Amino acid sequence: MINIYSKIFIAGHKGMLGSSILRILKKRGYKNLITIEKKKLDLRKQLLVKKFFKKNKPNAVIIAAAKVGGIKANMDYPADFIYDNLQIQTNLISASYEYKVKKLILFGSSCIYPKNISKPIKENQMMTGSLEETNESYSIAKIAGIKMIEAFNKQYKKKYICLMPCNLFGPNDNYDTKNSHFLPAFIKKIYLASKKKNNKIVKLWGTGKPLREVLYVDEVGDACEYFLKKKTDSHLINIGSSTEKTIKEYAKKVRSKIDKSVIIKFDNDKKLDGVKRKKLDTNLARKYGWKNKMNFDETLEMTIKNFKKYY
């Protein structure tokens, strides 16, 4: 069983999710956390990954490392998204099996699910319909990782799991307005517009009509620590929240926290909308005893404050 003395390798500890997991595990007293800089270990290189595992012998592995980005980045770089994510996952999962890792958690995203599901999405609905075309490469890579874990669990009697969060936000996010997810892009664009003396207009992509569920990243860090220690019969578990709004509503909420005089305009390009709705069913996580405690207003204010301080 994993405990505070177990050797835990956090792959991707510099990213938003990885840094949250590292922060939470340190705060809760975990003594043997293993991290390594991307420039010192390219997770896409199988031999280097195996050498690292042979030397460090982790008891648990958390795969928060991934190539991620917003809708435009997924459309522009599909080859990078499928290649990098397939390589990272495959190398870490196979090395974990080879070096007898007890517990592995792979993180993915709600985009693994079909695009035309209007009701909250259950885990068993993966691969029951067509994917959203704009992020198909990333989705397919993550589905391959989930199926690989399912296969290793079945053949080798492992208990590896996959946690699928909804859209995340929080400290250490990516604020590149061309490659980031929608909420950090809104924060940066509206903040920059607020600094103008005149013409405080911000132009946002799409129609603003799609519905999105969001979750503060530390909630997922909490779920990670919970499921590290929890025995489950399920290999795929949704991690979601009760906060769901339209893209336009999120933009207005961010504006209300930064500068109410900013004027928001959408370009109405439907191609940049993505799926109309993407809400996760979290009953399985609740069955295992985990549920989110997020106050959206408070965590959004914390995120904006962090943005202003560091960016």
Image (cartoon, rainbow, N blue to C red):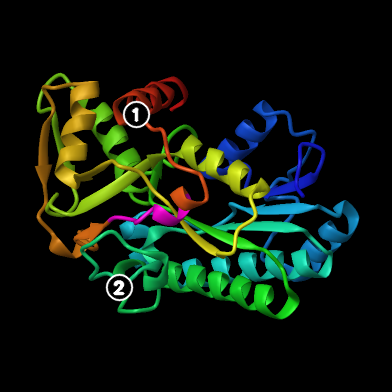
Q: Position of residue 101 (x, y in %)?
A: 78, 60
Mark 1 or mark 2: whose residue is earlier in sequence? 2
Q: Is residue 284 magenta?
A: yes
Badge 2 marks a residue whose secondary structure is helix
Residue at the image point whose x is 18% and y is 65% from the top: 271
Q: Does the magenta stretch include residue 30?
A: no
- The residue where tag 1 is placed is 295
The magenta span reads 279-285
Q: Distance between the residues labelled 1 and 2?
A: 32 Å
- The residue where tag 2 is placed is 133
Choose top left, top right, bottom left or bottom right for residue 50.
bottom right
* Residue 5 disc label: none
Q: Position of residue 178 (x, y in %)?
A: 33, 50
Q: Where is residue 177 in the image (x, y as percent from the top left)?
A: 33, 44
Is 218 left, or right, of 208 in this rendering?
Answer: right
Sort mark 2 into few (<14), some (14-19) or many (20+) by Cα contacts within 10 Å: some
Sort mark 1 into few (<14), some (14-19) or many (20+) by Cα contacts within 10 Å: few
Closer to the observer: label 1 or label 2? 1
